[in-house]
Image: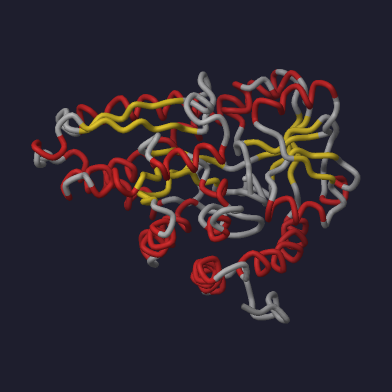
Amino acid sequence: MSDVTKTGMDRRNFLRTTTLAAAGAAVSAPFLSNPARAAGTTWKIQSVWDAGTVGYTLFEEWCNNMVNKSNGELTFKPFPAKAVAADNNALFDSVRTGVLQAMNPFTLYWSGKIPASVFLSSYPAGPDQPAQWDTMFYGLGMLEKTREIYKKYGLFYVGPIHHDANVIHSKKPVNSLADLKGMKIRLPGGMVAEVFEQFGVSTVSLPGSDIFPALEKGTIDAADYVGPAVNWDLGFAQVTNYILFGPPGVMSVYQPVDLMDLTVNMRAWTQLPDPMKQLVEDQVHAYSLHHYVTIQKRNVEALEKFKQAGSTVSRLSAQDMQEFRRAAIPVWYRWANKNDDAKEIFKLQLEFMMNDIVGYITPDDIKGQSL
């Protein structure tokens, strides 16, 4: 979601469940550290969630539990969006300089600063199941590569936090890609906008707080945002009548597994003793599962509320999905070729998508493309 301001149901996530269950077991074990180094340590952490949304409530609860999990050695002091850093650029700089010790952003916010970040969360027609992202991060070495990239910016990438798929709320029905032509839609910039523009969409980048009034006034026809749970909290049912999903089993074709993360100022990270670092990593891993399944439960409940309020759900077809992927592939390569870091991350993902276990991409699909 470039300079994005904010951004279904469980999809065969046996792998991610077993992986994160192991992390949860690790978290439950007694924690021993070096109190002389860590006692009294407090991290100020700003999220990109607005106060009052289910996203921020979950994040705040998790932060508030850290003092007990660490036996009082480490405190996470949470802040909602804009509380300390006024916008995303300020958030990035605040963590780099140590004004904040950490942040909880949508990872691809930094595509303008870190081009590889567009491949550190789901992207148009890319891997669309949470288990696939856990496999790449924790099984195929993507976590280590990501940390090497962030280190160049004085940051430590602790780990991904699964959030949701992003969906589009519109004032008029959309039943196919063809129906998008001529619409003005609030979308993330960067890769997502570039793909939608190929289908005749005029894209607009707006902060999350500006989406409701823009829809209300009719200055945009539709808006991408996160999933039904948070979008219900923000009142989208009052200003739109339609919700667009992907084909059955895929809530979104353009950001199906939207990832957040916990990123820490490198100096703050290195000052922690190793056992405390491991605790933080384990807690992020466990929180990812908790956040994801809680949001999915809320999505089920919120979607019924949307329907009761008069919203209609439509889905793109499997054929639309294939057409969308064909349009997306050249965009993947343009972003991958922005620098060596982006290229390395994308190569790992491309090999995974071309493996017969996944089977999303064939050699014919990428004919003529090069890295």
Q: Which image quarter holds the N terminus?
A: top right
Q: Which image quarter holds the C terminus?
A: bottom right
Q: Nearer the viewer, residue 261 or 97?
A: 97
Residue 361, quarter of picture = bottom right
Left or right: where does residue 289 sit relative to residue 351? left
Q: Is residue 293 visible?
A: yes
- Identify the residue at horizontal 42%, vertical 45% (top origin): 96
Left or right: where does residue 265 sit relative to residue 193? left
- Identify the residue at horizontal 82%, vertical 48% (top origin): 176
Estimate the x, y position of residue 210 in percent, counting from the top left: 70, 26
Q: How is the image coloured?
A: secondary structure
**Count of number-bearing discs:** 0
Left or right: where does residue 292 sit relative to residue 251? left
Q: Is residue 357 visible?
A: no
Residue ranking furthest to the right: 182
Estimate the x, y position of residue 14 in percent, counting from the top left: 40, 52
Estimate the x, y position of residue 174 in percent, counting from the top left: 82, 40
- Identify the residue at horizontal 21%, vertical 44% (top origin): 272
Estimate the x, y position of residue 320 in percent, counting from the top left: 77, 56
State whether residue 231 is above or below residue 336.
above
